[in-house]
Image: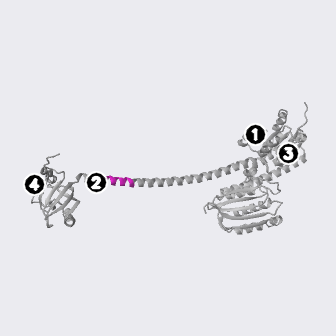
Amino acid sequence: MNYNVDYKELYSNFPSGYFCSLPDGTIVDSNKRFLDLTNYTREEVIGKKKITDFLSLGGKIYFENVYSPALKLKGTIEEINFNFLKKEGTKFPVLINSVEVKDKNGIHLFTQSAVFNISQRKKYEHELLIAKRKANDLSNELKDVNEELLSRAKLILEQKLKLEEFNQHLENKNTQLSGFAHIASHNLRAPVSNLVALKDFYKESTDLGDKAILFSKVEVVIGHLNETLNELIESVKIQGNKDITHDPIIFDSVFEKTLEILDNQILDSKAVVTSNFSEYSKIEYPKLYMESIMLNLLSNSIRYSSPDRIAKIHFCTEINNNNEVMFIAKDNGLGIDLQKHGHKLFGLNNTFHRHPDSKGVGLFMTKTQIEAIGGSITVESEVDKGTTFKIILKKNI
Amino acid sequence: MIRKRPLLAIVDDDKIFQFTLTRVINYNKQVERIINFSDGEKAIQYLTDNKVTNENIPDIIFLDSNMPILDGWQFIEEYKSIKTEIKKKIVIVMWSSSINPIDTERASKISEISNYLIKPIKLEEVKIFFDDLETLL
């Protein structure tokens, strides 16, 4: 195939600018596209303008210091970005590729340069840059929002924990209240109803001897009632006394004191009482409560020891997995059937053994005191094996 | 029909209540004999020991709800497991000082309990109970 290509026309309308310059930079030829890009006429450029005339000051410095030496060194240079000045003074971005044309002896004759208008690409680049900046801004904004959300989530979690704590407190109160309802129903109403019945008999009775018997019964009931009321008042005092002073307590000292108080019972029962408070030896706790807790637990263990074996009672302290101080009282006594009596264990006037000294006050008071300080008491027991009371004295030491 | 007067068991740790109840019942000569137990476990033990001797088994049990060792509710649980071996109808009346509706409700759901009476003893209530006893036995 033979196309009749007009190279002159092709050169003139080539889709990028082209010019040819002397080693000193003077432009000696250019195609039409170059003139169109710069808005000059052929007469204004050829033989009159140098490349540097199309460059701004910054462009000129770059041309002298980078472009020219690099071209001289390698004979060719590609994709150098300049801002070209049009005739009217406006700028447009270009990429220049240049190549030196030399004669046989290596003498530099011309420089041929192609000029690509990259206004569109620059605009696009600019848009990209703006988009990127916007994306950055948005990302930062998101980061801020995220941080705020996180801090709010933290706040919500804190409030949730507070609510849970409050709920626990309410539950405790509720248990206390239903405990009181039980006490009011039985421990108070029972003696009062006895008094009512006795009073009716007393009124109807005409026999003086009978009246005396009835009155002696009234005295017994009043005695019970008085005792129960005192216990109740004591427990209400404990529950209401949130600001009780916490004294520095050495477990060993309180233990020694307890042993002295119960000296006779220990001797009579031949119980072997031991202790080990080395894991946690001191605590800030109301002294009166600690003495009462130890006294109650030790006298219980002695009272309900098994007649079949030598009583062994051991008190110790421990730090549990939640970092809470635990006080543990363990014995090998009669034990309690928790299946049957578990729910009544810490109630007022509940006893589980037919023992002359059983009054059922101790554990009720012990539990009240422990809970007033924010602790808790649990029990493990097996009939005829022994009982272990585990007390969490304080949380989060 | 003249029926032999019933045998009554009172299961209550409250000695004063036992005294007043015994006094009311003896005064009206409503029972043949009263057997006293100070807690549920002792009463269950007695029923178990005497299950083949009908004349020793009470016709009526006055049962306190709140007692040490084995309370009234626990007594009922234990009683359920031995009652098939006892060849005698026993009317169980629960006595309680509790006016708590929860307790009344609880008692009404237990078929072994025929009456739930609230302390103190009201003479009229005891009288009505014994008047109606024929229908329960």
Q: Element at badge 1?
A: loop
Residue with the mark numbered 3 = B48
Distance between the alpha carbons at the discs numbered 3 and 2: 101 Å
Q: Quadrant of the C terminus of chain A?
A: bottom right
- Pinpoint residue A157: horizontal percent, then vertical percent: 53, 53
Residue with the mark numbered 2 = A125
Query: Where, by quadrant of the figure, is residue A396 drawn?
Result: bottom right
Q: Amino acid at mark 3?
A: Thr
Of labels 4 and 2, the one closer to you: 4
Distance between the alpha carbons at the discs numbered 3 and 1: 21 Å
Sequence-wise, the earlier of marks 3 and 1 is 3
Range of the magenta residues?
Answer: A125-140
In the rendered image, residues at marks 2 and 1 fall on the same chain: no
> Which of the chains bears the disc numbered 2?
A
Depth order, front residue of A199/A72: A72
- Pinpoint residue B137: horizontal percent, then vertical percent: 84, 35
Say which residue appears at 17% left-offset and 51% top-offset: A14
